[in-house]
Amino acid sequence: MTNHTHQPPVIRAQGLTKHFTRGKKTVEAVRGLDLEIHQGELVAFLGPNGAGKSTTLRMLTTLIPPTAGTAEVAGHDVVRAQGAVRRSIGYVGQGNAAAYIQRGRDELMSQARAHGIPRPAAKARIDELLSAFDLQEYADRTVQTLSGGQRRRLDIAIGLLNRPEVLFLDEPSTGLDPQNRANLQEQIRRLHEDGTTIVLTTHYLEEADALAGRVIVIDHGVMIADDTAPRLKERLGDLVLLGFSTEADATAAAARAESALSGPTVIDRAGTQVSIRTPRGADSAPALAIDLAAHGTPAIRMEVRPPTLDDVFLDLTGRSLRESAQSTTQPTTQTEGAAA
Ligand SMILES: Nc1ncnc2c1ncn2[C@@H]1O[C@H](COP(=O)(O)OP(=O)(O)OP(=O)(O)O)[C@@H](O)[C@H]1O
């Protein structure tokens, strides 16, 4: 996380909570989120389907009111000063913002006028955005004829018309092919370099890893980690996998590794395999292999796996993000509470 001790945060949430009521069930979509995001940060909310990412974004962008807690964006309260928040932000939701039968350029003009931007200034801004998002040659086609990637870029251009201080992107690259995803990520990186504060949601580990300076992992409506991707991974450590010719060797090696390695180390033995999760395991593995051989239990196989963000998620929740992204489970309570 960047050190911004002298600036007030651009986004601040305290105890932010959202419950939805469906029949007799209350879904606790977001549960007491505390958050500070500073100017110029690029933050990814990472979590499986149903984790509460979109609901958080929708509260921060004034689209739905919190059940409890408070949030301020660009210095304005999301409940008491909705208009001021909306004027300070751009929001690109999961659905396409652009109308299908309009030409891209016309859609941009309508939206610019809706923001109250005078026509000549709007025209200049639209040309600027069409160029920034490589959309000039598609601007005079109807939106329905654009590819998914072109449409998504148009959506983001719409979100930027009012030169927002903060840009919220809800799953910007979902549904895009790898090439379009890479292109979009490049555009997001450029916006970030220009100083825009960006908050995006994703369940693509690679996207959070490659793009965001800060990753906030959300699961079951709760923030479970908040750090840079490298630091989240470094804290977990590398996985060192060792294979032995006999179970007895593996057992002896596991005991030896316990005393040879320092730091928060987790050692498991299964059959002839020993797996060791240890900080900077890649550095310590060669010396460990020599040590084990010298003690009469040579490893016949060794592999070092650097941690992925999925390993971090698995460590934090006991579930794999890739697998849990398929499910939509969330905490529910049986209450008669009113719908939000
Ligand atoms: N309007 C609503 N009414 C009832 N339940 C809702 C509503 N909106 C969201 N939920 C529920 O709240 C929980 C959190 O949903 P949310 O859309 O915030 O998750 P998410 O992390 O953004 O997931 P995804 O990655 O699928 O977009 C889910 O269980 C969802 O079904």
Image (cartoon, rainbow, N blue to C red):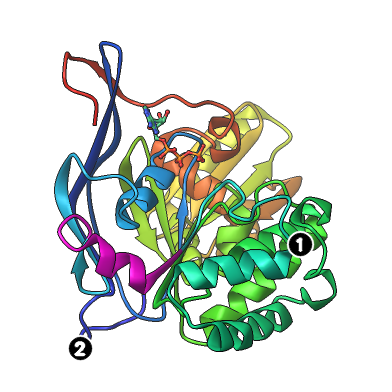
Q: Which residue is mark 1?
A: 150
Res 128 → quadrant? bottom right
- The answer to whether residue 235 is above or below residue 197 is above
At x 65%, y 48%, the residue is 174
Q: Quadrant of the C terminus?
A: top left
- The answer to whether residue 313 is above or below residue 198 is above
Q: Secondary structure at mark 1?
A: helix
Q: Is residue 85 magenta?
A: yes
Percent x, y for residue 285? Answer: 61, 60
- The answer to whether residue 28 is above or below residue 123 is above
Q: Earlier in the sequence, mark 2 or mark 1?
A: 2
Nearest to the observer: residue 294 or residue 80: 80
How many C-alpha atoms fall within 10 Å of the one at disc 2: few (<14), some, or many (≥20)?
A: few
Percent x, y for residue 271? Answer: 63, 26
- Amino acid type at circle 2 is His
Q: Quadrant of the N terminus?
A: bottom left
Percent x, y for residue 124? Answer: 62, 88
How much space separates mark 2 and mark 1, taking CA atoms? 39 Å
Nearest to the observer: residue 57 or residue 124: 124
- Count the numbered circles shown: 2
Report the disc number at residue 6.
2
Percent x, y for residue 38? Answer: 31, 76
Specify the segment rendered in magenta. 78-90
How many C-alpha atoms fall within 10 Å of the one at disc 1: few (<14), some, or many (≥20)?
A: many
Q: Is residue 159 left or right of residue 13?
A: right
